[in-house]
Amino acid sequence: IVLNSHVCLCYCFIVPTKNSNLRTVSKGGQISLGKKYAGQQVLVEKIAEGSWTVQTVVTLPKTDIQKHLEIYLKNQESEQK
């Protein structure tokens, strides 16, 4: 940030928690989540520049979506009663 011809350096310090892990991005732009997640599909969502969330997901074929949507809606109706 430049203010009145003076340079202001801004640093962000992140304090790790017991649920956080430091990873290094490889030269190819990859990170490893560990063997526990090998072969699983994940959804990577960019929150801001340099900040992402990663969630494991289960994908359904298009032909199964209607069936699962109907089951979900029936469950929602029964929970509201």
Image (tube, rainbow, N blue to C red):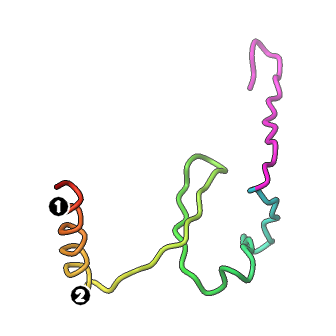
Looking at the rendering, the stretch of residues picked out in magenta corresponds to 1-18
**Vertical comparison of 24 with 7: above or below:** below
Image side of residue 81 versus residue 56, left or right: left
The amino acid type found where label 1 is placed reads Glu
* SS type, badge 2: helix
Which of disc 1 and disc 2 is earlier in sequence? Answer: 2
Query: Would you say residue 53 sits in the magenta stretch?
Result: no
Q: Nearer the viewer, residue 34 or 81?
A: 81
Report how many numbered discs are placed on residues in the image: 2
- Element marked by disc 1: helix
Residue drawn 80% across the image and 71% down it: 26
Quadrant for the N terminus in the image: top right
Tell us which disc is closer to us: 2 or 1.
1
Identify the main secondary structure in magenta: loop
The relative height of residue 69 versus residue 10 in the rendered view (above or below) is below
Residue, far front: 81
Residue 77 - label: 1
| Placement of the C terminus among the 4 image quadrants | bottom left
Question: Residue 64 at what x, y percent from top left?
Answer: 26, 85
- Residue 74 position by quadrant: bottom left
Please give the label number shown on residue 48: none
- Give whichever of 42, 1 is nearer the camera: 42
Disc 2 target residue: 63
* Amino acid found under the numbered disc labelled 2: Thr
Foreground residue, 74 or 24? 74
Q: Residue at x 55, y 55 (%)?
A: 46
